[in-house]
Image (cartoon, rainbow, N blue to C red):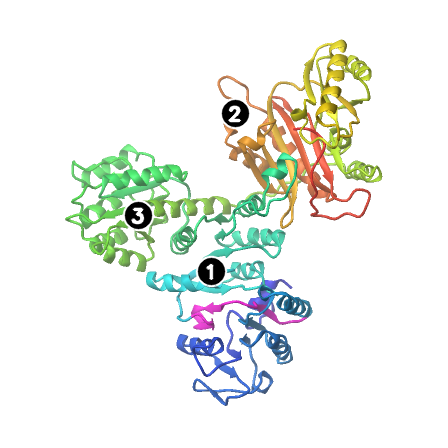
Amino acid sequence: MGAWSMIDGRSRGERSAFFEPESVAIIGASRDPSKVGGSVVANLRAAGFEGRILPVNPTADVVQGLPATASLLAIDGPVDLAVIAVLAPAVLPALKECVTKRVGGAVVISAGFREAGPDGQAREAELRTWLATQPIRVLGPNCLGWIRPTRRLNASFAPGMPLAGGIAFVSHSGALATAILDWARDRRLGFSLFATLGNQADLTESDILEAVARDPETRVAAVYLEGLADGRRFFDVLRRAVARKPMVVLKAGRSTEGARAVSSHTGALAGSDVAFEAAVRQAGAVRARSVEELFDVARSLACQPAPRGRRVLVVTNGGGLGVVATDAARDAGLDIAPLDAPVQAQLREVLPGTASLGNPVDLVGDADAARYANALQAVGPDAGVDAALVIVTAQAATDAAGIARAVLGATRGWSRPVVAALVGGGRVAPGARILEEAGVPCFAFPEPAVTALAGMALSAERARPRPAEPGPSIRPPAALAAIEGLRTANAERLGLSELAPLLIAYDIPILTPRLASSPEEAAAIAGQLGCPVALKIASSDISHKTDVGGVTLGLTSADDVAHAAALMLARVRARRPDAAIRGIVVQPMAPPGRELLLGVVRDPQFGPLAMVGLGGIYVEVLRDTATRLAPVSPAEAVRMLDELKTAALLRGVRGEPPVDRTALAAAVSRLSHLAADCPDLAEVEVNPLVATSTGVVAVDARATLACPAGASAPGATVPGSGADG
């Protein structure tokens, strides 16, 4: 049974312990409302919870005017939800009583677990082990609590009940949640759910999001994360949730402290935050970059329809702020295009000659409520725009309240979103209040309004259904045989020679390498292949061969090959006397084309990540890459190519032919499937992959095995590799 159904009870037709409890027991209830156990009782009473409030206190018969019992088991009748606020050593015994009493869920506010040193860590480990076999679902420990506004349920020690609304806020931070509660009350922002997760000994962010996705009261989820219990499950849950409603996510800790020490380009570029970014993007959610943006986007999605595109109409009584909005929109990827001639003609009939009829529509400083109404009615909801931004500045003739009412009347029934920026202080505040109460998000300046619209547009784009695609046609027996051969050979760091059978099994074209043990043999191989050829040093101890003079290109004769090979061996031995050199790789020269990097690295949280970007020796300098969780479809690979800063180069510039994007996307997809199918490969990198107008070919590759000649350890990460890129 899914975790969501165990939380909200819907699949079993049962009343939900968390979403619709009719009785709440407070274990550790205090007569003193200033104590944690007392504040929960006080909050439930103050919120107007209509069910039974059942204090449990072994030393008191009455708690804050309510009859108390000495133990949970002494309560007469069923208990749906328990809130536990006792000392940490007493939490597990209290939960065992909950199971005996058949309580469906518990909120453990008590601290003193893994955050409290070795004793607390051991206590939490015992709690997790026990919970894994029990029917009860537990939020916490060490959490602020759980609030369900429509049920008047404040099962937390945070004072005050937020308004009911369409936003489900899920937070790893209790301190942030407390601040948001206070902030939201001043802005009359409503919530369907307010949940803090604490140490997540049982219920995790994925469990709560799974429930939120099916909650009919929730229109959008706003999620603040500081880490993930299970990255891959989070991705799967988030992807399913986005199919039902928008998800906006803010994750703290975007720095590179979680990056692994690896020597491949792919590993150096794929830090932990890159993996999270890829998961959110691929799932279809929107990632906010600040707390302000998290709630700006969420509240806009909660009360306005999603835009169908990125075309935005700006209506303003201040030309300067119209320009500011236009600049911000262009930076955010929105389109402030001029209005069509028929629409401008309609505006000309209702606006004074001093007004600007393009986009932004500048009503000039003396604009009154009627002028705003006339402009919006003349434009209408279907005049080639997908959203509207109304800007009001506090000028001499400005009646903000009147303008707000006019805006509401003129846009009533629009299927496009409308947001507003009322710029000023006390003179525009009445208008902002009227708009907010009517469900039009109001901002202090144009920039955050534009950011909210951009987030709404992105959410709508990512939520559009995408057709299922078959995976690439591969030959698993050949792939498995190649991996088994590498295990048997006790290989760990692999180059193109070792990877060739595996790449061929996944239909990734390669320039077949030939290994020479001496300059004379290299010359002979060059004669067989036909010149021109390239030489590369063969050593699993050398990651970047160009750095030590281990690459020579464009050799046009056997004599040149022999001479260059001898010089290369001497040069590399002088620069890297510690390296074990197996010989020299001889390859045909690659055709001219765009050099790209294809790579896969295993993230500890999310598993294999596929990456594509500009290749060659400057990849880590330019850092032009796109990343997804593997495996990816060819269509997703095309979207990755479109994200690159150098995407235009792949389409052809200044008379150059475009590369074969279909073949390139297929190679990205196939390499991602290879890594997903072969968990023993810790890292794989093809660099360069040369893309031409007629196809692609892998010129060099490197990889590492997670467990050479032993049992597989999916997700393991080891330093990488042998071949150059």
Question: Which mark is drawn over residue 445?
Answer: 3
Near mark 1 (Cα within 10 A), the count class, few <14, some 14-19 or many ≥20, is: many
Residue type at numbered disc 2: Leu
Near mark 2 (Cα within 10 A), the count class, few <14, some 14-19 or many ≥20, is: some
Taking depth in this image into account, of 456 and 535 the one nearest to the observer is 535
Q: Residue at x 73, y 29 (%)?
A: 496
Camera sees residue 534: yes
Q: Quadrant of the C terminus?
A: top right
Q: Residue at x 59, y 36 (%)?
A: 637
Earlier sequence position, callout 3 versus callout 1: 1
- Residue 129, compared with residue 473, is above or below; it is below
Earlier sequence position, callout 3 versus callout 2: 3
Q: Is residue 232 magenta?
A: no
| Residue on which the image places disc 2 | 649
Residue 342 in percent (x, y) is at 27, 34
Camera sees residue 217: no
Near mark 3 (Cα within 10 A), the count class, few <14, some 14-19 or many ≥20, is: some
Label 3 with label 2: CB-CB less than 8 Å:
no
- Residue 614, compared with residue 393, is above or below; it is above
Residue type at numbered disc 1: Phe
SS assignment at label 1: strand
Magenta stretch, residue numbers: 134-158
Q: Residue furthest right?
A: 488
Residue 45 in percent (x, y) is at 42, 79
Q: Cα distance, mark 3 to mark 2?
A: 37 Å
Q: Nearer the viewer, mark 3 or mark 2?
A: 3
In the image: residue 553, left or right of residue 217: right
Taking depth in this image into account, of 481 and 346 the one nearest to the observer is 481
Residue type at numbered disc 3: Phe
* Residue 671 picture quarter: top right
| Residue on which the image places disc 1 | 169
Q: Residue at x 52, y 25 (%)?
A: 649
